Image (cartoon, grey):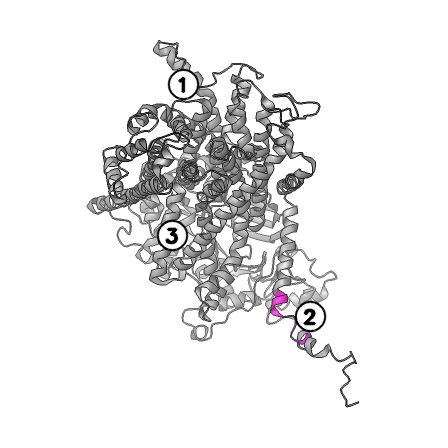
Amino acid sequence: MTTTPTAADGPTGAGADDAPAPAGPRGPGRAASVAVYVLGRLLTAIVSLFAVIVAGFFLFRILPGDPVRAMTEGREVTAEQREELRRQFGLDQPLWLQFLDYAKGLLHFDLGVSFQYREPVADLILERLGPTLLLAGTGTIIAALLGLFLGTRAGWRPGGRGDRINTAVALFFWSVPTFWLGLLLIVLLASGRGFMPGLFPTGGMVDPTLTGPVERALSTAQHMVLPIVTMVAVIYAQYLMIMRSSLMDEKGADYLTTARAKGLRDALVRRRHAVPNALLPTVTLIFLNLGQVVSGVILVETVFSWPGLGQLFYSGLQVPDIGLVQGLFVVFAASVILMNLLADLVYPLLDPRVRP
Amino acid sequence: MSAPTGSVPGPRPEPPTGPEPTAGRSPRSLARRRRREALLRFAREYARNRAGMFGLVSLLVIGALALTAPLFIDQTHLTVTGAPGDPFQPPGGDHPLGTDNFGRSVLDLIIWGARVSLTVGLLATFVSVSLGTLAGITAGHFGSSGGTGGRVVASIIMRVTDWFLVLPTLVLAVALAAVLPRGTGTIILAIGLTVWPATARLVRAQTLAVEARPYVERARALGGGHAHVMGWHVLPNVMPVVLAQTTLLVATSIIAESTLAFLGMGDPTTISWGALLQAARTSGAISAGIWWYIVPPGLAIAVVALSFTLCGRAVEAVINPRLRRRS
Amino acid sequence: MSGLLDVRDLNVTYTSGAGDVPAVRGVDLSLEPGDTLGVAGESGSGKSTVALALLRLLPAGTRVTGRILLEGEDVLTMKWGRLRAVRWVGASVVFQGAMHSLNPVRRIGDQIAEPLLVHGTVPAKRVEERVAELLEQVGLPASRAQDHPHRLSGGQRQRVMIAMALACEPRLIIADEATTALDVMIQAQILALLERLVEENGIGMLMISHDLSVLSATCKRVAVMYAGRIVEEGPAHQVVHDPAHPYASALSAAFPKIGDPASRLAPRGLPGDPPDPADPPSGCAFRPRCAMVETVCATVDPPLWPVRPDAVGHSERRAACVHVGSGRDGIEGASTPGETSTEETSR
């Protein structure tokens, strides 16, 4: 007999066919396993976060040798000023004490002081958080919708005309540097010299001369168009390629044959059966690649002078304002880790197989 | 007759070639021939991929231009003081792509910039692929056949890899570039040290697949040590995947180079495509609508990145017909 | 011409970049309502391709010729709309390996309800009730509708598959390796269930399996396929216990027969592999592995002959081998060997 009981039987085993409920635990046991799952993910995130803090400390306090020199690079400073800075930033203490201080501060969301603005880094970040969230959120959502939609189209009929065009366009955008696309849009649509002069503002978030809330909102929307277009163009391409290949992987799946045999029309087979399954690896990869959204935000904000964290980061780099850059480094990394934690917690809702 | 006549050439070649024909070819020459055939088959398959050929040809042309640039570009014309034209001359005449804010020919700058951009892209890729391959093979090998200690090492490597994978690459690279001394070497290091995790994951997966094959089992049973198994059996089998990944990574690295240069992390005196765009921005070319200073460098980056991407996808398609997803 | 299913000269060719690969070559099958027919063969013999071809479920670009009459209507020439209406209502499929044939991310109840809703079999508000009824029919509690496939064992998933296949009360069920990869006890349960349901509802069943013993237990008639052709066909008991074609005997010998110690003590395997369908041997496709091969086998690909022309009911038992019954005389008498069409002998 060539039957192999283990081949297709999943974790429960075929021997338990009519045994009662070979399924996972329910009731109180289930709640416990959910708690274990959540705690596990939380712990992983905390370890990652701790590693980020250590890395930030190492990167900005130890690697440059003398942080004060790095802080004051390119400026004339007297020895007294250096000593003053040293004392002010606690650099005269032993390294482990410095780290402890730093870590303790982080617990109270104290990210240090910006050398350039002479203000707590945390305050600067809070001030700029809104614009960045607006830009990154809108951009990511549009890019995800567009990329998933086009990727589904392309992946369902690979090699077809639609697929070839979609893939070619996506590959082109993928190969283009984000900031260059932004510069190009400014030259074309905002510089006053391009072929559609002054259609959009060149930078900023809102026209400062406006006062009414409606006018200001409209002005913000107008200011957002080019940054969003730039972000979407570069990010959607990646989502498209991921969704396309996920769907191509699913295309041969047996359950699609079942769905077709049931008499479902092609669009329904795709929408109800193929896409929900293809979305699983796609969502994972999208969250794994969130770091690239951060990169996109930094570049787009820099190019369009959008008053957000990315621009703050850029301005910190130019000085260089090590305290500010270090704080932003931790915040950017932490936000990506947080989003990944969120993805881990949300993923079981999408995929019943990994539900605890 | 019985006296040995050393001058007679006839029977001399006999002893060395004697065992050869009877035992067939030596295993080494056999392996070499098999490798040559595989290479030929690869080339034939690759040639059938039109996008891949397009990428390859365009890379060859750009590479040739970059290598021979000193032959037809006068380097003094690339200095700020030796600029041959007036500032911001539109395209035409002596300067097919116009001039920059110092009056240097944009076309010359682009061709010269290819040297730095390609060098940085290739070297950064080399650093990251070496790192990624080392981490991937080590994690894969010790994860599958390293005992308890090995498995701990492997899982630590993978944890670190995952951690790097999640971090925003650009932020990390910029941070590195900001704290290290300014220069091309720093840029290479900053990119190389941040983009390796994807390679490591890929190589690890491939290593696990190779390690499960019977001949690796046999090599281990015959007493092959870790170094032997990793170097002789795993590495050659991982190479095709690494090759495809390398080609794709060059595109990423070139874009990353331009990005770092644009953010002002590069050496301002070197001419690279990213540095040109940075210069265009700081010289006010954007608001003045000097498109010929902005379009060509970006287009150059896009063409080279696209070419590498097309080559990489073609290689991937040849070695693994079921296209893998890109992460 | 049969009532329920009548397949004539079915040819399926997979087209790929490397060239055409014939997977099914001139297969005839017929089934009366309420009847059971088994199709046996190794993997690669084309039996699953036949199953998929019956509802035109093969991948795009596959060439299918011949005639597939389902209740008198040719499936191969149907318009798409009509084909969709016929799928699952005219004939439904119990697929092999129920793990992958069920959508992993959708609830079982929804998957069973889907054809009911698509075909409007029952009013929308009665769907839930019908799903519960179907689950109970296959011996599963109705509460299972809320579960996802991975929470069920292999046997339970196969039961779900059967419940699903019964949903629209089809006249024909195609069971494609429905019990493969299940443990022997579960296999027996599932077979008994299928048998009972088919009998109770008067459904015709086409059962496809590599396991002759399964088919002999369930089906009235059995056809044995090799390299895309039917090489022997007849009443199940006779084909299994007294095979005429050398391949059928090898296949039959590969499975232990209950109460026959010889088969247990000396299990006979079949040496070699099935032929490459892209490059089949000349003459009889089984020639390279056949113990009774003769020179004539290299030139002649014999059609299905009656096994014992003199015996009563000879038309029921046919095999495609030069050693069989009138085969030898037929070959020697025929002017163009191998050209004798299957239609001729089947009449």
Instruction: Identify the subunit bearing mark 2.
Output: C
The residue segment tinted magenta is B21-30
Residue C228 x, y percent position in the rendering = 59, 56
Q: Nearer the viewer, residue A97 or A292?
A: A97
Q: Nearer the viewer, mark 2 or mark 3?
A: 3
Q: Is residue A132 visible?
A: yes
Residue C54, compared with residue C307, is above or below; it is above
Q: Residue at horizontal 66%, vertical 72%?
A: B24
Give residue C192's quadrant in the image. bottom left
Crowd band around label 1 with a 10 angstrom C-alpha radius: few (<14), some (14–19), many (20+): many
- A111 within the magenta span: no
Q: Return the chain for callout 1.
A: A
| Residue labelled with disc 1 | A205
Q: Secondary structure at mark 3?
A: helix
Q: Secondary structure at mark 1?
A: loop
Q: x and y percent of residue C239 in the render?
A: 51, 64
Q: Is residue B26 magenta?
A: yes
Q: Chain of mark 3?
A: B
Say left or right for C344 vs A281.
right
* Kind of residue at disc 2: Thr
Task: Kindly identify the residue that appears in the image at 27 percent across and 49 percent down.
Answer: A24
Q: Name the residue beneath numbered marker 3.
A: B157
Q: How far apart are the alpha carbons under marks 1 and 2?
A: 88 Å
Q: Amino acid at mark 3?
A: Ile
Q: Determine whether A44 is above or below C191 in the image.
A: above
Mark 2: give few (<14), some (14-19) or many (20+) Cα within 10 Å. few
Q: Quadrant of residue B117?
A: top right
Callouts 1 and 3 in the same chain: no
Helix, strand or loop status at disc 2: helix
* Residue pointed to by mark 2: C295
The reply to whether dot 2 and dot 3 touch (C-beta < 8 Å) is no
Residue name at image x 53 percent, y 54 percent: B239
